[in-house]
Image (spheres, rainbow, N blue to C red):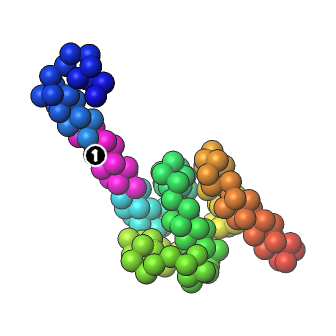
């Protein structure tokens, strides 16, 4: 409508709509590639036993998940690092939408990954990225309280 009122032909408006659709598709595919790349680099860091690379890629991975607002994948990531990946069932997600299918290698991480204190890794690498997305505020608070509770029990 806007293009027709301004005197643009329907062919021009169709081209603009197509270009906008293509640009949106490119952004979506970039997000998928970025996420997959981070998952690949995390798996490599685990396989190579590189704690410093694992921390760096975990920060980037959690940033990628936070920007996209993927609360399920973030919750799964935290649960795996805490050693309780089966808690993902409590979220009521359908079996096919769980992030466990794409991150099967995370099950090898367990509660002690590369000699790192996973609670500190979560507190210093994942929570700061999550706190940048207001939509994840409830989950961020939930995880923070869970970490405080775990720290209190083990003191």
In depth, the one of 140 and 1 nearer the eye is: 1
Position of the N terminus, as image quadrant, is: top left
Position of the C terminus, as image quadrant, is: bottom right
Looking at the image, residue 5 lies above or below residue 47: above
**Which residue is depicted at the point 64% across and 74% down?**
82
**Which residue is depicted at the point 32% across and 53% down?**
33
Residue 109 spot, x, y in % from top left: 52, 75
For label 1, the crowd category at 10 Å Cα-Cα, with few meaning under 14, some 14 to 19 and many 20 or more, is: few
Q: Which residues are magenta?
A: 22-35
Which residue is the extreme one toward the top? 7
Which residue, given by chain and number where applicable, does mark 1 sit on?
Answer: 25
Which residue is the extreme one toward the left? 11
| 2 lies left or right of 19 | right
Q: Is residue 23 visible?
A: yes
**Which residue is depicted at the point 55% across and 78% down?**
92
Residue 28 spot, x, y in % from top left: 34, 48
Tell me, yes or no, whether the highlighted magenta stretch contains residue 105: no
Q: Quadrant of residue 81?
A: bottom right
Q: Is residue 47 visible?
A: no
Residue 69 spot, x, y in % from top left: 53, 54
In depth, the one of 2 and 121 nearer the eye is: 2
In depth, the one of 95 and 83 nearer the eye is: 95
In terms of secondary structure, where does tag 1 sit?
Answer: helix
Q: Main secondary structure of the magenta part?
A: helix
**Which residue is depicted at the point 74% across and 59% down?**
141
Residue 30 spot, x, y in % from top left: 33, 47
| 47 lies left or right of 129 | left
Q: Quadrant of residue 122?
A: bottom right
Tell me, yes or no, whether the highlighted magenta stretch contains residue 28: yes
Looking at the image, residue 143 lies above or below residue 13: below
| 74 lies left or right of 142 | left
């Amino acid at each position: 409508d806007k293009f027709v009122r301004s005197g643009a032909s329907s062919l021009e408006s169709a081209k603009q709509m197509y270009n906008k659709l293509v640009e949106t598709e490119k952004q979506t595919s970039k997000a998928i590639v970025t996420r997959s790349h981070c998952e690949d680099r995390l798996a490599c860091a685990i396989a190579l036993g590189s704690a410093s690379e694992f921390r760096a890629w975990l920060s980037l991975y959690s940033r990628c998940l936070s920007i996209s607002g993927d609360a399920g994948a973030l919750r799964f990531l935290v649960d795996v690092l805490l050693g309780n990946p089966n808690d993902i069932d409590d979220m009521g997600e359908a079996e096919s939408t769980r992030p466990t299918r794409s991150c099967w290698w995370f099950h090898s991480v367990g509660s002690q990954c590369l000699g790192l204190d996973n609670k500190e890794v979560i507190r210093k690498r994942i929570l700061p990225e999550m706190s940048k997305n207001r939509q994840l505020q409830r989950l961020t608070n939930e995880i923070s309280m869970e970490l405080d509770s775990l720290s209190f029990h083990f003191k």
